[in-house]
Amino acid sequence: MTTVLGIEGTAWNLSAAIVDEDDVIAEVTETYRPATGGIHPREAAQHHAMYASNVIERLLNEFRENGHHPKDIDAIAFSQGPGLGACLRTVATSARALAMSLDVPMVGVNHCIAHIEIGRWKTPATDPVVLYVSGGNSQVLAHRAGKYRIFGETLDIGIGNALDKFARGAGLSHPGGPKVEAYAKESTGYVKMPYVVKGMDFSFSGLSTAAKDALSKHSLEDVCYSFQENAFAMLVEVTERALAHTGKNEVLLAGGVGANMRLREMLDVMCDDRGARFYVPERKFMGDNGAMIAYTGLLMFKSGTTTPIDQSHVDPSFRPDTVDVTWITDKHEEVL
Ligand code: AMP
Ligand code: MG
């Protein structure tokens, strides 16, 4: 058995977990909740710094209570990016200290890839087109020739941030996504909004602004509904084209916005029409979590990848398509 401890802290959630090949053995999370407004990067980093040692201590206690010993840990994984620089640096510092004290290697994990791998672990998906929709990120990805390729992505802000920004402007508290979903359910009509897909990429910031402006003429319910319909149709369109292009027959939904039932419904209809299978992990594995970092670290460690301390610097714009996916063989792929 291989056992890896992983720490996530790219944005609002500080979460650490220990996993082996079979399951999550222990997990402890401390969430930063802004008193007002959205996520403040420096405050989030201060939150992570304040709770880091407490989270690790509780995690190791839970690990011991489940019959293990810290010396069973083979590697320390940490989210190396993308994310908020100050938050990433705090987590990397904790990971370095822990790796040195346990005398085990570090594994720097790409946060987007971790969302994919936890989905492949916790659902039957094997080789999916992935729609990864979170606060800061929105991407359509799929594995091809040794890398997770980005088939389409946002040209400006993530869909989660677009929803949160609009919601904040409408006087709703953070995070706005779930509130927009709730208001949308009470809508009685559609309001015309921008629909921006360029090639395989999409853009949300104009939609977010247009939705805010529409509030002067239309009800909050109708604006929330129309915002969702347009934004999600854009995401589903690009996901469908990636399916057609790659010839794959599975779709995996990842990231916090994946909690949205209307988005799931639209993806489900599209997959049904194309004869593709649609997978959604359990809620706790969809948003940012330590288990996804630990598990991806385990896959990387087992396939021979570790991160020397002098290469453990963080990268706030770390792109998933720069990582060699050493843990998947291309057996399901023809010569490209
Ligand atoms: P993540 O960055 O992956 O942890 O996801 C956080 C984002 O998910 C925030 O922008 C939330 O507003 C968004 N979110 C959470 N639940 C929902 C929902 N039901 N509908 C839309 N967005 C949501
Ligand atoms: Mg995320």
Image (tube, rainbow, N blue to C red):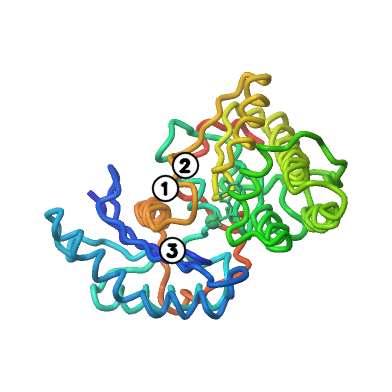
Give the residue type that dot 2 points to. Answer: Gly
Give the secondary structure at mark 2.
Answer: helix
What's the distance in space between the residues labelled 1 and 3, CA to CA? 14 Å
Is mark 3 in CB contact (under 8 Å) with mark 2? no
Ligand 1 neighbours mark 1 (CB distance < 8 Å): no
What's the distance in space between the residues labelled 2 and 1, CA to CA? 11 Å
Give the secondary structure at mark 3.
Answer: strand
Instruction: Work out whether mark 3 precedes mark 2 in sequence or the reverse, and give the earlier one.
Output: 3
Local crowd size for mark 1, using a 10 Å CA cut-off: few (<14), some (14–19), many (≥20): few
Is residue 320 visible to the viewer in this orientation of the structure?
Answer: yes
Residue at label 2? 119
In percent of the image, x 57 and y 67: which residue is there? 83
Mark on residue 284? Answer: 1
Mark on residue 8? Answer: 3
Give the residue type that dot 3 points to. Answer: Glu
Residue in front for this viewpoint, 86 or 44: 44
